[in-house]
Amino acid sequence: MSKPQFAILRFAKYKGPEISNIEAHNERTKENYASNPDIDKSRSHLNFHLITPEQKYRAEAERQIKGAGCRTRSDSVRVVEALVTATPEFFKGKKKNEIKAYFQEALDFIREHQDPKTIISAVVHMDEKTPHMHLSFVPLTEDGRLSAKEIVGNKKKLTQWQDRFWEHMVKKYPDLERGESASKTGRSHIPPRVFKEVVHLSRMKEQIMTLMADSNLLNKKSKMEELGALLDKYVPALEAMRTKLKKYDKAYRELSDENTALEAELKTTQNAGREKIANKLKYGKMEQELSELHALMDNIPPEIIAAYRRHTVGLQNER
């Protein structure tokens, strides 16, 4: 049975110092990428822009915000990043121009729902496992307010983005599936708390990377203590979550085997039993949920693990 192909759109919000970190990743301005072992530098020349940034992300965001006359606080979201991709099966056998057309279609969709002038950069990465686009924009509303919350900020809004994105993309790519939204399914296979835990881990990772990016960290005792405390929470929680996900991976494999049998049964069953069997087919939903979880859990920077080891050794030496 061929695997379902899902159109994927995710959002992340950035406030300050971390904006330069995502820019370095998106624009490939570092010489080395130890934090992401999935990057194959021999393929980086295949990456391409659909929108090329005119200046640094943070500087462009501040320019737009000032131009709109918006006031900001230190915790104001200045940049929203949309990650656009699809499940790996969708890209199999596609040439670069076909892949480019997919992301251009996605860019056209976002331009319909967000002022094109607010878009800072749209870059497609071909040097990682699955082609994907990082599209960064300043969250200015139609009436010139800075409000990431209004644009992407609650579950209802996110579901609307997902629905509209699929409705737009499926016109050109009819094999793409929407997948049932979390609001409709209630995530009956994977409890909502698991998703909350993984999102919390992702936020902790961002905090750790921001602290570690401080070149003067070793001379700031309070920051070192903050980093140590975060590492003590993050790394054990990460390992516990990986163990938990293995259980869901096993359940998914069993479910996909059951699905294969149900698909065969569906072909031979008369109308009276078809609906009952069709209702049991949950394969696509669970695959989508696991893909989301693994995407959030993958690419844990090795320098975080190295920092944790140094931290624990340091604690042992103090005893």
Image: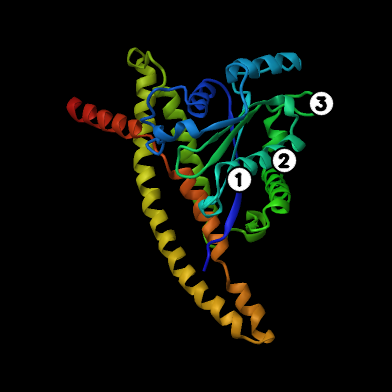
Q: Position of residue 75 (x, y in %)?
A: 60, 23
Q: Earlier in the sequence, mark 1 or mark 2?
A: 1
Q: Secondary structure at mark 2?
A: helix
Q: Residues within 10 Å of mark 2 (few under 14, many from 20)?
A: some
Q: Which image quarter: residue 273?
A: bottom right
**Mark 2 — residue?**
109
Q: Nearer the viewer, mark 2 or mark 3?
A: 2
**Mark 1 — residue?**
98
Residue at x-position 70% and y-position 51%: 172
Q: Are marks 1 and 2 in contact (CB under 8 Å)?
A: no
Q: Earlier in the sequence, mark 1 or mark 3?
A: 1
Q: Earlier in the sequence, mark 2 or mark 3?
A: 2
Q: Report the disc number at residue 313.
A: none
Q: Is residue 133 above or below residue 181?
A: above
Between the residue at mark 1 and the residue at mark 3, the CA separation in whole angstroms equals: 36 Å
Q: Position of residue 211 (x, y in %)?
A: 42, 23
Q: Position of residue 47 (x, y in %)?
A: 52, 33
Q: Is residue 192 left or right of residue 60?
A: left
Q: Identify the amino acid type marked 3.
A: Asp
Q: Secondary structure at mark 3?
A: loop
**Mark 3 — residue?**
143
Q: Residues within 10 Å of mark 3 (few under 14, many from 20)?
A: few
Residue at x-position 38% and y-position 43%: 237
Q: Residues within 10 Å of mark 1 (few under 14, many from 20)?
A: few
Q: Is residue 161 above or below residue 214?
A: below
Q: Is residue 102 visible?
A: yes
Q: Is residue 182 above or below residue 107?
A: below
Between the residue at mark 2 and the residue at mark 3, the CA separation in whole angstroms equals: 20 Å
Q: Are marks 1 and 3 in contact (CB under 8 Å)?
A: no
Q: Position of residue 200 (x, y in %)?
A: 49, 40
Q: Is residue 77 visible?
A: no
Q: Quadrant of the C terminus?
A: top left
